[in-house]
C-alpha cells in the first residue's frame, strides 16, 4: 500500500524521485488521485507553508519542495483531469506593469498550486488590460498582483481600476516587499498578504 505520509515527507524534504515514485505506485494501486493530492502533496506543502511563515524554513527549501510537488503533479494531473476533480479555485497571478521582479510572485504561484488552486501565471510586466483580459477568459475568482518597486506600485492601483471598470466580480489581492495593508486599503484591493503562505490563506478566504 502506497504510503501517503512518505509522499508528504518527500514533498517537505524536496525529494523529487521519492515524490514521483510514491505518486506512481499509489496510482498503480488504484488510489483516488484526489486522495493522493490532498493527503500526500497538499499535506506536505501545507507543512512547508506553515514552517515558512514561522521562519523555520527559508526560500530555498520552499523552492525545492515546490519543485518536488511540480514533478509529482506532472504524473497526477492527467488522472485528476480524467477523474473530473475540480480545483479549489482559479487565480490569475502576475507582476504589474514596469516591474520585472518575479521571485516572490513565483513563490506565491507555487504555494497556491500546492494548496490546490489552478493558477494562470502571467509572468512579469503585465499591463492592466492583459490582467483584465486573462481574468475574463479564465473566469478566475482571484487576481494576484505583485510589485517590488515603489515606482510600480501605482500600476497596482491602475490594474484594480481596470478590473473594477470591466465589471468583473474578481477579487484582487496584492503583495510584494514595498506593499502594505494601508496601501492595499487605499487602492481598493480586496486583500494584502505579506508572504506567500499568507497569500494562500488570503486567497482561500477571498473565495468565500
Ligand atoms: Co531589484 N530592486 N531592481 N532586481 N531587487 C529591489 C526590489 C530593491 C529593494 C533593491 C534595493 O535597492 N535595495 C530596489 C527597489 C527599491 C524601491 O523601489 N524602493 C530594486 C531596484 C531599484 C531595481 C532596479 C530598478 C535596479 C536598476 O536597474 N537600477 C531594477 C528594476 C527592474 C524592473 O523591475 N523594471 C531591478 C532589477 C532586479 C533584478 C532583475 C536584477 C533582480 C530581479 C530578478 C527576478 O526577480 N527574477 C532584482 C532583485 C533580485 C532584487 C532584490 C535583491 C531581491 C528581490 C527578491 O526576489 N526578494 C531586491 C532587494 C531585496 O529585497 N533585498 C531588489 C525575495 C522575494 C522572495 O521576496 O519578492 O518580497 P518578495 O516576495 C515575498 C513577499 O513580498 C510576498 O511573498 C514573497 C515570499 O514571501 N509577495 C506577495 C510577493 N508578491 C506577492 C503577491 C501577493 C502576496 C504576497 O499577492 C498577490
Image: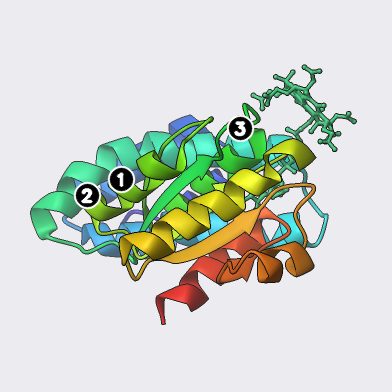
Of all residues, the one furthest to the top in this rendering is: 100
> Closer to the camera: disc 3 or disc 1?
1
Say few, some or many: other residues with alpha carbon within 10 Å of mark 3 (under 14 / 14 to 19 / 20 or more): some
> Closer to the camera: disc 2 or disc 3?
2
Residue situated in front as seen by the camera: 135 or 68: 135
Say few, some or many: other residues with alpha carbon within 10 Å of mark 1 (under 14 / 14 to 19 / 20 or more): some
Residue situated in front as seen by the camera: 64 or 149: 149
User: Residue visible at 74% across and 37% down?
Assistant: 151
Instruction: Give x and y (percent) for residue 62.
Output: 65, 43
Query: Split into 4 quadrants, where in the image is the C terminus?
Result: bottom left
Instruction: Give x and y (percent) for residue 30.
Output: 16, 56
Q: Secondary structure at mark 2?
A: helix
Q: Secondary structure at mark 3?
A: loop
Which of the 4 image quadrants contains residue 163?
Answer: bottom left
Say few, some or many: other residues with alpha carbon within 10 Å of mark 2 (under 14 / 14 to 19 / 20 or more): few
Residue that badge 2 annotates = 137
Discs 1, 2 touching: Cβ within 8 Å? yes
Of all residues, the one furthest to the right in this rendering is: 55
The quarter of the rendering in which ligand 1 is drawn is top right
Horizontal side, residue 59 vs residue 46: left or right: right
Tell me which colouring the rendered structure shows.
rainbow
- Please say whether residue 12 is visible from this viewpoint: no
Residue that badge 3 annotates = 102
User: Residue visible at 71% across and 34% down?
Assistant: 60
Mark found first going from the N terminus, 2 or 3: 3
- Up-down relation of residue 99 to residue 96 (above or below): above
Q: Secondary structure at mark 1?
A: helix
Instruction: Give x and y (percent) for residue 61.
Output: 69, 39
Distance between mark 3 and mark 1 Cα atoms: 18 Å
Horizontal side, residue 48 vs residue 181: left or right: left
Whether the residue under disc 3 has CB within 8 Å of ligand 1 = yes
Residue that badge 1 annotates = 134
Amino acid at each position: 500500500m502506497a504510503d501517503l505520509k512518505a509522499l508528504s515527507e518527500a514533498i517537505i524534504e524536496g525529494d523529487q524521485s521519492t515524490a514521483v515514485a510514491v505518486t506512481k505506485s499509489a496510482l498503480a494501486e488504484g488510489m483516488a488521485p484526489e486522495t493522493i493530492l490532498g493527503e500526500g502533496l497538499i499535506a506536505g506543502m501545507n507543512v512547508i507553508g506553515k514552517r515558512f511563515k514561522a521562519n523555520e524554513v527559508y526560500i530555498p527549501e520552499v523552492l525545492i519542495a515546490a519543485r518536488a510537488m511540480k514533478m509529482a503533479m506532472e504524473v497526477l494531473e492527467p488522472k485528476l483531469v480524467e477523474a473530473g476533480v475540480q480545483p479549489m479555485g482559479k487565480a490569475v497571478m502576475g507582476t504589474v506593469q514596469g516591474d520585472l521582479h518575479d521571485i516572490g510572485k513565483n513563490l506565491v504561484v507555487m504555494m497556491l498550486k500546492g494548496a490546490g488552486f489552478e493558477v494562470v501565471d502571467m509572468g512579469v510586466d503585465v499591463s492592466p488590460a492583459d490582467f483584465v483580459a486573462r481574468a475574463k477568459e479564465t473566469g478566475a475568482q482571484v487576481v494576484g498582483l505583485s510589485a517590488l518597486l515603489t515606482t510600480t506600485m501605482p500600476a497596482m492601483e491602475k490594474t484594480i481600476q481596470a478590473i473594477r471598470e470591466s465589471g468583473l466580480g474578481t477579487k484582487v489581492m496584492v503583495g510584494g516587499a514595498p506593499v502594505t495593508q494601508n496601501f492595499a486599503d487605499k487602492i481598493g484591493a480586496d486583500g494584502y498578504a505579506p508572504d506567500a503562505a499568507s497569500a494562500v490563506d488570503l486567497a482561500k478566504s477571498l473565495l468565500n
